[in-house]
């Protein structure tokens, strides 16, 4: 239950009382949902690096208590996309410096580990799903697809491999790390048809390594996929 300061959300969220037929008060959004919405605002640059995140304004925006907002901000702090400072409050983490690429490096290491584990555990059905996803990448690469859309396609392939590793904690860590700067910056690696074609070739090779149950090659390809995106991010000056 929310506390007494929680306010009703938008009218579109309201339900209908089962006994009276009158509209029922909408349930305030949980902290994790507020965190997701804030993350989306950061990813789409509607909240900018360094921008202050004022609890009172966010509480009014989402129709919840300041305590609920603070909980959401702490979730984002754990993902590295929000900074909380004593006496200053919260702000969007700066989009520069070693901290960002350290997070990207962690994401690369975790995904490489998941890929290595998946070699011995991935099923024929999962290999089939991966193959179909790679074909979709190959079809999309030469088109005018938005970089973010292409990036999301690669994320779906990565999710198949993370699940195939059969390590729920590892899968959760990958999701948590990727929710920060790796996801925000990832689309930069797919801004041209040439970059997208190269990525599709890497994913095709990774599928082949997984099919051959070759953990060393699969791990190297998983690292290459991330390293090439990072190289492009560095090239454009982020």
Image (tube, rainbow, N blue to C red):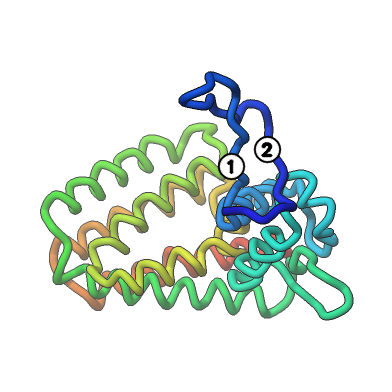
Q: Could you say which quadrant of the image residue 68 lies in?
A: bottom right
Between 133 and 45, the residue placed more toward the observer is 45
Residue 15, labelled with which disc?
none
Number of numbered discs visible in the structure rendering? 2
Q: Is residue 204 left or right of residue 16?
A: left
User: Which element is circle 1 on?
Assistant: loop
Q: Eyeballing the image, is 206 above or below 154?
A: below
| Residue at the spot 60% in from the left edge and 73% down from the top edge | 78
User: Which element is circle 2 on?
Assistant: loop
Measure the C-alpha gap from mark 1 to mark 2: 7 Å
Q: Eyeballing the image, is 162 above or below 59?
A: below
Residue under label 2, please give it.
Answer: 9
Which quadrant would the C terminus be assigned to in this image? bottom right
Pointer 1 with pointer 2, Cβ within 8 A: yes
Residue 19 x/y as whole percent? 48, 24
Between 144 and 124, the residue placed more toward the observer is 124
| Residue at the spot 79% in from the left edge and 65% down from the top edge | 91
Residue 5 x/y as whole percent? 74, 52
| Residue at the spot 19% in from the left edge and 52% down from the top edge | 126
Q: Residue furthest top?
A: 21
Residue 176 x/y as whole percent? 49, 67
Residue 142 x/y as whole percent? 46, 36
Q: Residue furthest right?
A: 87
Q: Is residue 234 visible?
A: no
Between 91 and 23, the residue placed more toward the observer is 23
Instruction: Identify the mark nearer the N-term, 1 or 2.
Output: 2
Between 98 and 174, the residue placed more toward the observer is 174
**Callout 2 environment at 10 Å: few (<14), some (14 to 19), or many (20+)?**
some
Q: Eyeballing the image, is 166 above or below 37?
A: below
Residue under label 1, please give it.
Answer: 27
């Amino acid at each position: 239950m929310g506390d007494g300061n929680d306010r009703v959300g938008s009218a579109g969220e309201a339900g209908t009382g089962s006994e009276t037929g009158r509209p029922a008060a909408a349930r305030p959004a949980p902290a994790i949902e507020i965190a997701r919405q804030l993350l989306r605002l950061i990813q789409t640059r509607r909240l900018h690096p360094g921008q202050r995140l004022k609890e009172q304004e966010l509480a009014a925006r989402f129709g919840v208590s300041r305590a609920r907002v603070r909980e959401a901000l702490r979730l984002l702090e754990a993902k590295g996309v929000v900074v909380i400072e004593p006496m200053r409050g919260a702000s969007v983490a700066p989009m520069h410096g070693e901290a960002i690429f350290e997070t990207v490096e962690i994401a690369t290491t975790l995904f490489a580990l998941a890929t290595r584990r998946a070699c011995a555990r991935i099923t024929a059905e999962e290999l089939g799903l991966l193959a179909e996803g790679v074909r979709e990448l190959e079809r999309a690469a030469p088109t005018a697809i938005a970089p973010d859309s292409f990036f999301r396609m690669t994320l779906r392939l990565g999710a198949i491999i993370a699940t195939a590793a059969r390590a729920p904690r590892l899968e959760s860590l990958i999701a948590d790390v990727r929710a920060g700067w790796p996801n925000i910056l990832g689309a930069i690696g797919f801004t041209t048809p040439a970059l997208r074609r190269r990525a599709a070739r890497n994913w095709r090779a990774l599928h082949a390594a997984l099919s051959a149950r070759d953990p060393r090659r699969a791990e190297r390809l998983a690292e290459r996929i991330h390293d090439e995106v990072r190289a492009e991010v560095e090239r454009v000056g982020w």
